[in-house]
Every structure is written in structure tokens, then in C-alpha cells.
Image (cartoon, rainbow, N blue to C red):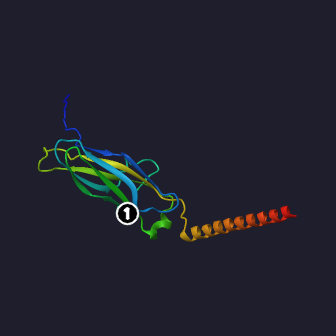
Amino acid sequence: MFLMIFTSNSASITVQPAEIYIKMSNNFIQGNTTKKIVVTNVENHTVNVLAYLENPYPDYIRPNRNPLQNLSWITIVPFQSTLQPGSSKAFYLYLTIPEKYHETLLGKKWEVWATFREEPTNDSTSNTFVREYSVRVYIDTPQSIVSLESLRALISIYLILIASMVIFSFIILRYNKKRMKR
């Protein structure tokens, strides 16, 4: 029997968190989802980090999830950074699903990976292996859309109800005052 032993350097960066959930309850979220990924250089040399998105391999995707049909709907900012020893950098996810797709994308459950690759630098030791770290990003679209018109109508109804209650209370107070004067 032949045994091969491979050694590899430990990780140069840490990536947190391991999973991110973006749940759109009432409407589609546009722009910054306020989801942050922090990459930290744990080495004593500079590390270049390249960030990109990818759909998971079919064997690795979580049950009841599908790959995101258009990776251009999510952006990672910044997409590249150079980390000094011991430093950290925050990367942000921006999600923008074009409005023309909203009606057809209700109730979807997607999974996409935000992947961070260590790129060689001039002052780093040579690595034989390319190291990549992926964060699972789960995106749930809303079951239904609350339109601006329906929100305005609901606010109008609430304002009418509040005004009616104030007027009714005023009438009752006036009636009680007149009744007590008799």
C-alpha cells in the first residue's frame, strides 16, 4: 500500500460569518441589504483578497434552495482588497432585482456563494494551492408584494378611523358636560 502525505499551510484569512440570510418579507429589497462580511488577515505578511459571486455546485446546494438565476443582481463591494498583517476589511452585499421581474419571482428561495480568494502578493511566501473561502448567502423573496397604492389606501383608512374616534370622543365629552350641567 502506498501512502501519500500532503502538507499545506494554515489559512491566511478568516471570513465571517459563514452564512447570511436575506429575507424579503413584504417587498423586494433594493440596494444595500446591510449584510456585512468581514475578512481578516491572520498572517504576518500582506494578503490580497479577491471577492466574487458564484452559484453552488448542485451537490453542495442546501435542500429546498435553487441557484440564483442572475448573479448580476448582487454586487460585492469592494471586490478586491489588500490586507496588511492583522488587519480586517468589511465587504458589503448589494442586492438589486429589477422591478420587471418582481411578479415572477415571488416565493423563491435561492442560494449563492460569496467567495473570497487569496491572491499572491510580492512579499508573500509562494503557495502551491489557491485558497478560497465561501459564505453561503440565502435569499428568500416575498410571498406577495405590498404596493405603494395599497399602503396609501391603508394609511388613509387608518387616518379616517382615528379622526372618527377623535370626533366621537369629542361629541361624547360635550354631551356628558351638558348632561352634568342640568
Q: Which of 64 and 157 is in front in this view?
A: 157
Residue 68 can be seen in this image: no
The residue at 68%/68% (across/down) is 163
Residue 30 percent location from the top left of the image: 42, 64
Q: Which of 67 and 21 is in front in this view?
A: 21
Q: Mark 1 points at which residue?
A: 73
Q: Is mark 1 on a helix, strand or loop?
A: helix
Residue 146 can be seen in this image: yes
3 over 113 or under it: above or below = above
160 over 45 or under it: above or below = below
Q: In which quarter of the image is residue 7?
A: top left
- Quadrant housing the N terminus: top left
The residue at 34%/49% (across/down) is 135
The residue at 67%/69% (across/down) is 160
Residue 133 percent location from the top left of the image: 29, 47
Residue type at mark 1? Trp
